Image (spheres, grey):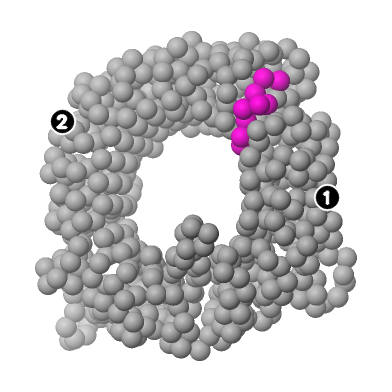
Amino acid sequence: MERSYQNLPPEILRLTFSYLGGADLNHAQLTCKRWSPVAQKLLYKYMRFQGSSIKDIIRMFRHHPSLAQSVNRVSLDLVKMREYYKVSDTSNEEGIIDEEGRKYIVSQHYHDMLAFLCLCPNITLIKLPPNPPKMMYHDLMELRENGYLARLGEIDKYCLERSRAKLPGYYNLLYALKNSIKDMHLNNQLDSAKEGNLTDSSSSLVLNNISSFTQLQQLRLEMQRYAHVHEFDSFLDNCSENLTTLEVVLTQDSPEFHTCLVEQIHIKHLPNIKNLTVLTSAPSSNQEIQYITRKFPGLQALSIRSQPTTAVLLADACRFFDYICRIPSVRIEGGVILTINDFTEYMPQFLQCTRFERLNFYCQHISQHTGNIDDVQIDDLYTETTSTLNTSNRPLSGITLQSACAKAPLEIIMTSQRNHIRTINITVDDRILDNALKGEDLGTILNNFSSLEDLYISGMEISHLDDVFVAAKRLNLGNFKIHCCLIDVDVFSRMSQRIESIASLSLLSSEWISDDDSSDDSKKFTLDLQMPFTKVGSLHITFSNLCSKALVRVMTNSITQYFNCVGGRRREELTYSEYKRLINESEHLKVNLCFATLSSWG
């Protein structure tokens, strides 16, 4: 394993290793990126290791100190604490006694992890798992005090999840970094109704001492029910004026508490809040939305979300349209239901709103499904409505269509916005309804969007996209992404000749098929992509079931700049020599490879 590391690039920008527990306890994951100037741009090469032990990484770092010194972010995944500590209640060996009186002996893997951290003096961000053992905090703080983690005090993000064990160590570590943390995620939900309030939990301690976190700018707070309103009230009293983003998640609340919550936010006067999100299980009333938008004139982003079973009719939403149009980014997520009449009567208001930068249509052929104001859902919208709406010429930059019958809204937007739209994102299922958006329809419509730069299509079979490829060639797209359930190799090879000038082509398929009935996977998946893509800036192709040696042949037979291969069942591994030959094929090549094992890289 060590020999393969000798050839890695000299700069590692991010390293993440994950203990997987059980039989995979020795496995780790290493992501390294190399920056190299190509055409005055920073292009990176990176690959993902899965199958190397942390001892190998430590050995590599000791041989190459510059690698360790360049690591500045680390994520420790130690969720399965019992996998890392040997229970030994009757043993006389020295161990750690937890809060419940159980004894644990530190495994060698834990010592390896600490040894690894000692080799990386420049870590500035460390993300700990939801329930690490209590001793981890003591060891990390000791490392910091001894200078091994010289900049640990400059951590700018910390994620605190559910604390079943009620470990005060969480709070101890957080409090030690109170003048550094800028982004925090607190989960103060109850594990069960019988437990009562988690008054001694770390998240409660943080809430009660929130004024100590002077640099806190973003906070996501999850609370289970209205019994915690006193904690939230105390939090608002002491919250730092630096807080600009607040997200409150209430999983079990009542409409009365929801209204109370909105009023509390205003009463406590958080003048610098620019981004506010309230996610509740109760409906969001128009009165509450008006209240928020009036009392928070500095809001740049508002998101009020309720469960999808709660419908917010567009007719009601338009009554507070004058308020929400003052905010550049608004998301009212509930069951935003639109009928044909709603669409023709009210949608012009949204299209004329000069503050919105994007208009997304989530068109489901299902009633009461999650939708938004800027991501507006359309129910039972058919082509008959296309001639009844004359929209303004307000420039929209992007449109998202998610529907089994998305042709109508596309044609409506095309009427007035075709010279402005730069991004179209379409998710369809052309196998369900007779009136669904077809490839030939989409190709015809796309020809009218003269400014289109990025096109994303999901759900259509590639054999139906012939006209789309023709339109794509004429439009000179910068990015073209296709996600199909099934891609026929021969059909794709034929169509790909029409998109020679696209800057970036992305293909994602769960299965690729070929007319070749040979059992040799390498023959099936060796595509001749050299000629069609002579001008393509980057090619993203994700295979989930591909012979890795065929992958090498695909790449060495083409001159593309990017190739992406994820997972899959392989009969043979990619050897290190093959990988080296692959990345040396072109200076412009970006490579992202993920393999289950790398046993042949020794």
Quarter where residue 379 is shown: top right
Instruction: Identify whether 120 is placed above or below 445.
Output: below
Callout 1: SS: helix
Return the x and y of residue 296 as percentages of the image width and height.
Answer: 30, 21
Query: Which residues fall within the magenta stretch?
Result: 415-423
Q: Amino acid at mark 2?
A: Asp
Identify the residue at horizontal 80%, vertical 55% (top origin): 497
Q: Residues within 10 Å of mark 1 (few under 14, many from 20)?
A: some
* Relative height, residue 561 to residue 180 (above, below): below
- For marks 1 and 2, give the one nearer the viewer: 1
| Amino acid type shown at disc 1 | Ser
Camera-side residue of 200 and 340: 340
Percent x, y for residue 96?
Answer: 18, 75
Identify the residue at horizontal 62%, vertical 27% (top origin): 420
Could you tell me which secondary element the residue under label 2 belongs to? helix
Image coordinates of residue 406 in percent, x first then y, are 72, 31
Name the image quarter holding residue 520. Answer: bottom right
Determine the image quadrant of residue 8. Answer: bottom left
* 417 in the magenta segment: yes
Q: Is residue 545 left or right of residue 592?
A: right
Look at the image and say whether residue 303 sits in the magenta stretch: no
Which label was assigned to residue 237?
2
Q: Earlier in the sequence, mark 1 or mark 2?
A: 2
Q: Is residue 188 above or below residue 310?
A: below
Position of residue 513 in the picture relative to residue 59 (left or right)? right
Kindly identify which numbered label has been placed on residue 463: 1
Residue 349 seen by the camera? yes
The picture places residue 592, in percent across and down from the top left corner, at 55, 66
Q: Nearer the viewer, residue 495 or 92?
A: 495
Q: Is residue 38 above or below residue 549?
A: above
